[in-house]
Image (cartoon, grey):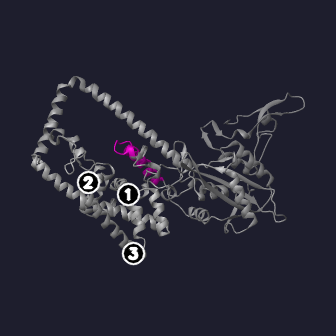
Amino acid sequence: MIFKKCKGCAQGRRNGTSCIIRQSNRSWHQVIKRVYRNEEEMSLNIPLSAYSGVKKEYIDDQGPPSEMPGINIVEIEEAIIQRVIKDVNLREELGRISRKLKGRKDLDIYTDGSLVVDSISGRDEKKMGVGWVLVDENSESSNFSFKCRIVDWPSSTRAELGTIWTAILVAPYEANIRVFTDSRAAIEGIQNFKGLTSIRSNFKTKNRSLISQIIDCCKTKMIKLELIKVKGHSKNIWNDKADSLAKEGLLSSLILEAQEVTTSSIRVTPLWRNKTIDCALRTFVNITTATVYETTWASLNSIKPVISSRLDDITNDQLNWENTWYTLKKLQGRKCTSFKKSNALMFRIKCINKLLPTKDICYQRSPAMYKSKTCIACIAGEESLEHLADCQIYQKIWERIEEFVMEALEAKLYDKWKVTNFGQELRRSFLGTSIEAKQIKRRLHIRGLTSIRLLEEIKEILGSRAKAKKTVCWFTELFWSNFHDRLWKFRCEVMAEWEKRNGIDLRAKKARLGKKRKSISNKNQANKENQSLMEEKSNVSSKNKEERIQKVADTKISRWIEVGSKDNWLSFKNN
């Protein structure tokens, strides 16, 4: 709507220099999204609900009627609801409740949020519902209650904050509200946010958009808000009703979606794919970057069988990736304080990615020098990382390794928790009983992989999930270190002797590498005419691959934001 500077009119001349309609600016209000000004004009973006159609004004009895658009000045409660609520049906429901509560000054409201996890197609999806009830002192039933769903960034605290926000939205102007909630985190989140002064600390806050909406609504409507903590599931009739409404809200067609509030100090809203980033901003940037890297890693040929198919009768969904990442992170970053730890970390990464220089890898790099992929120990098959677990020559070494690992693990359990008498049960769970089961577990353990089923078995033995997690992590560390010290080093010594007998030394390897580079250079010079075309095709192929990976990563991030679900091989933690 555009307003032009008044240059006089018939109505104004009849009454001198003033217009026939006057209204003090204190008696009206409207929430305006944006204002544009110049010397002659001013334009305002106002909600469509403010336009009430054409209204007839009669100047006098003799003159013809003039038609002019009328502006419906809505109450401040409805104006705020129209500005911050996207869902039309939700906006109408909140507006209806707001009109019925008009004029009430003291309100006691019990609020509750609900978070459930549904398993859909083998994946966990989180849903949130909100519900509140207005206390009626004269009866055990209330005429005013509300329920709906809330979307994005699922957490129990977010559901509680959404409930508090909807309760404040319908509250009358200058009302005194007591909100009873069983969420200490929601109360502390609102109280702590009020003291934040810097942009940096603001963008570190989780559920920032909801908390800022609550505070902004209280300021705009001059509401006196008191948050009171109550004990959940304490047979309080009003709290139980709020809990039931929140659970019913999980299936509601009304959808609550929070928008960011801009202030004089914070005029930007961080978005990702048109969704408000409602977690710590730096954390979100790190997660999106890591997801792209990890999606690229998951597309490698050595990792695809683990991620997308079955590995030794165990599916990807049954692998305990959390244990693998935790074991690696114990040697990463600031914790990597020596060359020994650095070498151990590189060895473990190579185990996971099947990059240890076994005979098949050596043959792939230099077929002319290594002639075949045959294992030099048993000469019965190709030497690969999996073959090391099955090779008959190494079986005695494996028995010693497993004995050392279990003895060290039992000693750790005794020193930490005084756990005894579970040795045989732990051996059966970690190592297996039959020869086939032992080989399957060895193949997994070489790559630092364990199953969720193993975690559950250890939990049953020790009686604690936390203890089971630590025990599985200790086992993985001990297995890797003993495999490196007792088998891999021995195998490398045998391989070095074999290379020496076959005239393969460091000088020959370097010479072979130099010839290979020279051959590639000569081939490039010979094909200079086709080189630009090949480079162009390579660039197009690389670009298509990057776009495909980015698309997959975006889908995973969207699922994390919307339903709180992520693939279990992704290393980042749920927010």
Residue pictured at 52% horizontal, 42% vertical = 273
Q: Please say if the residues under marks 1 and 3 sit with CB atoms less than 8 Å apart.
A: no
Q: Which of the pair 530/437 is nearer the observer?
A: 437
Q: Amino acid at mark 3?
A: Tyr
Q: Position of residue 314 (x, y in %)?
A: 43, 50
Q: Main secondary structure of the magenta part?
A: helix
Which residue is drawn at the image coordinates 25% and 56% (left, top)?
A: 394
Real-space Cα separation, disc 1 to disc 3, in angstroms: 27 Å
Residue 401 vs residue 451: left or right? Answer: left
Which residue is drawn at the image coordinates 25% and 63% (left, top)? 338
* Left or right position of 363 against 145: left
Q: Nearer the viewer, residue 554 or 53?
A: 554
Distance from Cα at disc 1 to Cα at disc 2: 15 Å
SS class of the residue under badge 1?
loop
Say above or below: 107 vs 516.
Answer: below
Give x and y (percent) for residue 113.
Answer: 65, 58
Q: Residue furthest front?
A: 434
- Neighbour class for label 1 at 10 Å: few (<14), some, many (≥20)? few
x%, y% of residue 561? Answer: 53, 48
Mark count: 3
Does the rendering let one see residue 496? yes
- Amino acid on which the number 1 mark rests in the picture: Ser
- Residue 205 drawn in magenta: no
Q: Give the magenta-colored segment's residue range.
A: 281-305
- Residue name at image x 37 percent, y 71 percent: 410
Nearer the observer, 426 or 225: 426
Q: Secondary structure at mark 3?
A: helix
User: Label 2 is placed on what type of residue?
Assistant: Gln
- Whether residue 570 sits left or right of residue 75 in the image: it is left
Whether residue 300 is in magenta: the answer is yes
Which residue is disc 2 drawn over? 392
Q: From the image, tell me which residue sits under label 1.
A: 434
